Amino acid sequence: MITRETLKSLPKNVQAPPYDLDAIRPGILHFGVGNFFRAHQAFYIEKILKDDPEWGIIGVGLTGGDRSKKKAEEFKAQDCLYSLTETAPSGKSDVSVIGCLRDYLLAPADPAAVLAHLADPAIRIVSMTITEGGYNIDENTGQFNLNTAAVKKDLENPESPSTIFGYVVEGLRRRRDAGHKAFTIMSCDNLRHNGTVARKAFLGYAKARDPELAKWIEENATFPNGMVDRITPTVTADIAKKLNERSGLSDDLPLVAEDFTQWVLEDDFADGRPALEKAGVQFVDDVTDYEHVKIRMLNAGHIMLCFPAILEGCEFVDQAIADKDLRGNLENFLNKDVIPTLQAPPGISLEGYRDSVISRFSNPAMADQTLRIASDGCSKIQVFWTETMRRAIENKRDMTRLVFGIASYLEMLRGKDQNGKAYEPIEPVYGDAERKLAKADDFESALKLPAFDSWRDLQTPELTNAIIAARKLIREKGVKAALPAS
Ligand code: CS2
């Protein structure tokens, strides 16, 4: 366990928080304290606290259940301290104890405390990493979904909420009534225009609750868009053990991330912000081009590499990229399918970005799991590949690599690799019907899966046939035989 006591005698290679923990006051409330948040947003905030101690973070978990309770207990037991190991592809690593998280609350266990923080004018930013599905946008209408049971329940009892929308809007209601300023609602999820998505979600809920309140929120709160980037693997018990062995700590919540990190953010804050530029955050007027480069190259490349890699039995991303055929396919995909249809933001070379992506994927110290990358492939394919796919179909470009990628995804969903080894694909948005489609050997019907909805209007019989043929080839002759030649 790490405690405040531990900080007094850290192993000499471990960096302590460079400020007095007792001087930190909370200014940010964050929903969804996952590994990515701990390695990314918290890492940046950590750097500015010495000069700006009023931006400490209160973490909030929204779900109950035993796992959440255990996590909350672990955070509490460590006074919310944890170690972050940042590792370069060369193997060089730095370890620091992060202290910016000053409390962790489980909303179902203590809703009043969460609401009290949200109503407190000292909290000036409410941030979140709740995954794409967390914004509750109806895929068919593109609007906030008012019909889920949890949202309906919150709308019936708006002062005792259970969803993030209910909490945030009730917090803002209390602030308005008390004559306080609104806070900034800052999404840190890996989505295009995450701020715009958050705006739609929170205003959608607020309008249904009380149009006047919604108007006040619209006029007073802000929703900056941001591009976030740092590869942060899942920490298994085995990895945790290794991290502790290397650091000399006995941390119950250790974390590892690559040494690369990027945060490009719109400077649109309702009530001030930390001087994040001092920590390396890049403030821009419009994040669009940055988001496209990241999502269409890094994230799209990740799944293009990992779907077939899983079939080949590769457990880790660095193992996958060390396979020269899989790497060649990824390079061809980036060079031929993505880069020619992408707009580079000022000062960024797409070729340089490609090289950095390949080097980042090669980082052996990350032990980043191919199954983590492939998880929720249904949403990822739509977010990461749609633009490239639509451009390719519309402009009649060569589709072989995309076809191969889709066929690999579908084969990967069977949960059995080429060597007959079983694994569990993680597809949280699929219900029973989709699971059945994914496991069945009906290649044509499998294309009805929602993963392909975002270009369904452009789907042609030729494309369908090409995907089916690629899938057959993978099944009969294996990934290597099916890999596009160039
Ligand atoms: C990965 C991301 O899960 C995925 O699909 O591509 O988690 C990736 O590691 C992060 O976006 C890096 O910023």
Image (cartoon, rainbow, N blue to C red):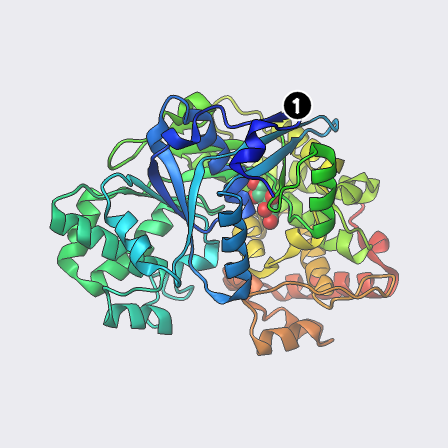
Residue at (82%, 55%) from the top-left corner?
313
Give, as a three-letter code, the residue at label 1: Lys
Q: Badge 1, how many Cα within 10 Å: few under 14, some, many 20+? A: few
Q: For this view, does 330 lie left or right of residue 83?
A: right
Q: Which of 369 and 180 is in front in this view?
A: 180
Q: For this view, does 71 lie left or right of residue 188?
A: right
Query: What is the quadrant of residue 364 in the picture?
Result: top right
Residue at (66%, 50%) from the top-left corner?
303
Query: What is the quadrant of residue 415 in the picture?
Result: bottom right
Q: Point out the image quarter for the N terminus.
A: top right
Q: For this view, does 424 lie left or right of residue 477?
A: left
Q: Which of 245 and 125 is in front in this view?
A: 245
How many numbered badges does the structure rendering display? 1
Residue 334, position as x, y percentages in the image: 65, 39
Tag 1 secondary structure: loop
Query: What is the quadrant of residue 465 in the picture?
Result: bottom right
Q: Which of 67 and 88 is in front in this view?
A: 67
User: In which of the image's four quarters is ligand 1 placed?
Assistant: top right
Pointer 1 residue: 12
Instruction: Give the vertical position of 381 relative to 280 (above or below).
Output: below
Residue at (70%, 49%) from the top-left corner?
369
Q: Quick check: can you spot residue 10?
A: yes
Residue 481, position as x, y percentages in the image: 86, 54
Instruction: Give the vertical position of 212 relative to 387 (above or below).
Output: below
Q: Which of 99 and 314 is in front in this view?
A: 99
Residue 96, position as x, y percentages in the image: 59, 30
Query: Mark 1 CB in 8 Å range of ligand 1?
Result: no
